[in-house]
């Protein structure tokens, strides 16, 4: 597939590298100057593109940006992008980083807000695994304890396409419902960054409590930031699992 990615940080960069390794044609754009963009593209084994070009002649566009950066994208960015091009949103809203976005704070589902900002349907994916998990936790299809990733959206065919990319990245895809249900894998839910297999993720998605998610999201940030040193990746996953009375990982 031809994939354009805007945002090449911990998540977007890893997706770019993995998609190129899986044989997809990948071009990228970020907020840096052209020399830095070229250097990042070379590092990831993909092609650099200007922002107006990264969305041209592609099958899938992946936005991997801080939520607050979404409204800064040019209003006409998608004007000439055909409707059948799938737009993926990997973002997670964190007030400490993204400042106040009143609608999300008042309960609007993050990727619904993103979709409204863009004026396009989006698929929410690649958001419920930590960057370290995404980079190094992948396994071949059928492998024991393969970690699963949630994919939400209103277009079943688009979700199938993205599920195949998730599989290429090394993860089982779990359909988490319509975009309005994607709060089930936002921060503060048992499905968020807890490294579950497909069966466990389905259960965790069902166990989420919408009203509790922002409270637990903020509690997690306060508790992790208060530590004298930032915990290791396994400790963060353990911490995330321990936020829930009904443990998401039962094995
Ligand atoms: N880190 C995680 O564990 C994780 C896990 C799942 C989902 N997410 C979510 O995925 C999103 C990306 O996360 P991340 O950790 O990859 O963030 P990150 O490392 O901070 O990278 C953000 C990327 O966005 C680019 N960017 C920012 N504003 C831009 C703009 N206006 N136009 C074009 N590019 C812009 C930055 O460009 P430069 O490189 O030029 O600065 C950078 O490449 C966030 O919403 C995050 O919450 C993160």
Image: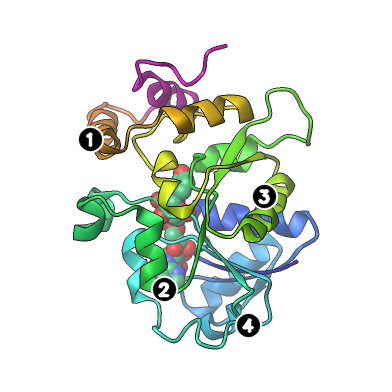
Q: Which residues are magenta?
A: 231-251
Residue bearing mark 2: 118
Which residue lies at the image location 23% right of the left edge and 59% below the top edge? 103
- Give the camera-side residue of 96 and 116: 116
Q: Which image quadrant: the N terminus?
A: bottom right
- Give the camera-side residue of 162 and 43: 162
What kind of element bears circle 3? helix
Real-space Cα distance between discs 4 and 3?
Answer: 22 Å
- Above or below 239: residue 225: below
Real-space Cα distance between discs 3 and 1?
Answer: 30 Å
Which residue lies at the image location 52% right of the left edge and 50% below the top edge? 152
Rendering quarter of residue 146: top right
Residue bearing mark 1: 215
Q: Is residue 239 found inside the magenta-colored segment of the image?
A: yes
What kind of element bears circle 1? helix
State ligand 1's quadrant. Answer: bottom left
Q: Residue 163 got which mark?
A: 3
């Amino acid at each position: 597939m031809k994939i354009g990615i805007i945002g090449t940080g911990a998540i977007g960069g890893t997706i770019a590298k993995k998609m190129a390794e899986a044989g997809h044609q990948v071009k990228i754009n970020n907020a840096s100057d052209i020399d830095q963009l070229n250097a990042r593209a070379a590092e990831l084994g993909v092609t650099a593109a200007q922002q107006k070009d990264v969305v041209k002649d592609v099958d899938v566009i992946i936005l991997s940006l801080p939520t607050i950066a979404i409204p800064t994208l040019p209003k006409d960015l998608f004007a000439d992008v055909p409707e059948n091009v799938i737009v993926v949103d990997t973002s997670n809203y964190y007030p400490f980083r993204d400042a106040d976005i009143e609608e999300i704070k008042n309960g609007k589902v993050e990727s619904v807000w993103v979709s409204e900002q863009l004026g396009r349907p989006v698929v929410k994916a690649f958001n419920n695994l930590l960057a370290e998990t995404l980079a190094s936790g992948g396994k071949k299809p059928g492998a024991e304890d393969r970690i699963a990733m949630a994919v939400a959206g209103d277009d079943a065919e688009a979700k199938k396409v993205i599920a195949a990319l998730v599989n290429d990245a090394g993860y089982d895809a779990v359909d988490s419902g319509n975009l309005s249900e994607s709060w089930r894998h936002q921060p503060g839910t048992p499905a968020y960054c807890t490294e579950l297999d497909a069966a466990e993720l389905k259960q965790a998605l069902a166990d989420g409590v919408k009203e509790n998610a922002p409270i637990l999201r903020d509690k997690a940030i306060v508790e992790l930031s208060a530590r004298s040193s930032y915990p290791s990746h396994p400790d963060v996953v353990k911490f995330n699992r321990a936020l829930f009375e009904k443990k998401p990982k039962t094995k």
